[in-house]
Amino acid sequence: MSRLAKPSIYESCHALVDPSASELDQLASTLQCIGQSNANSIDVFFLIYASSLVFFMQAGFAMLCAGCVQLKNVQNSMLKNLLDACGAALGFYSIGYAFAYGGSDFENPQKTFIGTSNFFLIGVDNLMFWLFQFAFAASSATIVAGTLAERCQMAAYLCYSMTLTGFVYPVVAHSIWSPQGFLSADSVNPLWGVGVIDFAGSAVVHLTGGTTAIIATYLLGPRRGRFYDHRGQPLEIPKEFPGHSAALQMLGTFILWFGWYGFNTGSALSITGPEQEQVVSLVAVNTTLSAASGCISALMLNYIIDDRRWGEGSFSLSVASNGCLSGLVSITGACAVVDPWSAVVIGFVAGILYLASSKLLVRLRLDDVVDAIPVHFTNGAWGTISTGLFAQSDLISLAYRQTISDQGIFMGGSGTLFGTQLLCVVINVGWICAVMVPFFFALNYMGWLRASSADEVEGLDSIYHGGKRSESFGEEPRVARYGEGNRRIRRRIRQQSNCYSSRNALIRQQSHSTARTSTAEGEEQIQKIYPQAVVP
């Protein structure tokens, strides 16, 4: 039967009605079936749309990273963003979803560490929920891409991406979002009667990615010449590595802001339930206000600092962009449970925290290419904690469809919710450190983590991507003229280097054995072994 010949919704629903019932009951049952079918279809389309927006954020991350790196590393940076999506898809399909949501039962009070069923999506009925959650997992992994740019090997990055989305992130998601999670507010018996409120993932997504970024950045080390000279001595003033395109940075920021509407509103998971339109509308408004407030606060504070320090202020585009993203990260967890004025305050504080954290990283000599750590770690933690300050009980009940016994401290709460939010931050950071510190240590020990100094100076595009640099802006690539021959040239140089090293070692050996062989004889022997070498 072709798709055009399929029965209508009315016919399908009418076929399910009990024929022995009265005509009025049959009509009521048919209408109820049609209404439910339409509601399910609308919810599925809503999740498809939200998932598409969240996945489109990958393009925003890619543009932002590409704009912040040097031209010689653009291809490498963008490919790592693509690998994030690919690795996340495979990791979350095979085991990640099962660990996060496998066997979820909203009526079962049992608490578990991870899920134990639905591996490879076996037995999963709601595939759209998987797609939406996969987009979240990919976003968490992509946070680290910009932090490690210009010096991380490709193999290490793919291993990290699959590990984070296949195991580390799912455990965090299970603990907070699964009804069997010990921190979940959706549990039958939530922690301390309230559980953790993280509506769209300030802790689950952004704090997870930000904490991983700190660990990886510390173990990977700064870019060559950023904080230390070629002799390893600390620079008095750290060297700046400006990105090659401010336009790409701004394009990435706007794409991320646009995608955030799917990120936050889609976390409602349904748009057809009672009063769901109020929840989704509030989420969208709060998302907008917090982003705007974070941008303004970071931009103006940076202007004041520059004016006091140098006598002339400056309006920094990168600071404004990251301030905007900081506001978005900070409101993610509380977007459905706070009033709009609270969103403005949360975003305003987020912009200040971003700027302070960014300058602290420089003092600590931690090299974060795109400032992902101040944006996602600092404001992921702030967003989680701010829920315990500004959340309102009536909005919590509306968003979670259940009565919560506490609210934010500034709203007259007892502090119980604030305590669960703090505990969530501590447990999240502790779990990620326990897993990712040994993981990155192992990669570093095997020599898979950091690219060599020569590769870093030449540019990762030239090393990993066919011997060519990016051809953006009409610039003729320095290496592309030699094509594949450039690889042979590098290989010949390495062979000659090994040859000269062996020659020098033989010279030293000959100079220490003058009792047996004269210097002239030694040089003659060297010329026989290495006829192409010239002995001084």
Image (cartoon, helix red, strand yellow):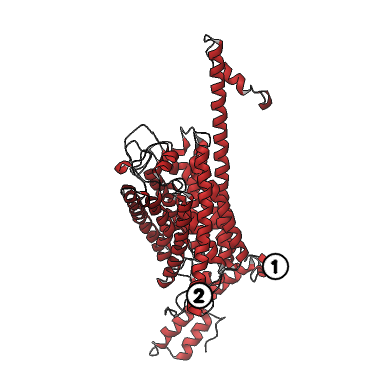
Task: Tell me: residue 29, above or below residue 431.
Answer: above
Q: Residues within 10 Å of mark 1 (few under 14, many from 20)?
A: few
Disc 2 secondary structure class:
helix
Q: Residues within 10 Å of mark 2 (few under 14, many from 20)?
A: some
Please state which amino acid type lies under the numbered disc 1. Gly
User: How much space separates mark 1 and mark 2, taking CA atoms?
Assistant: 35 Å
- Residue in the image at 47% along x and 55% along y: 329
430 sits to left or right of 312? left
Q: Is residue 145 visible?
A: no
Along the line of sight, which residue is nearer the eye, 376 or 169? 376
483 sits to left or right of 155? right
Which disc, if any, is residue 367?
A: none
Please state which amino acid type lies under the numbered disc 2. Asp
For label 2, the residue is: 306
Which disc, if any, is residue 474?
A: 1
Along the line of sight, which residue is nearer the eye, 366 or 330? 330
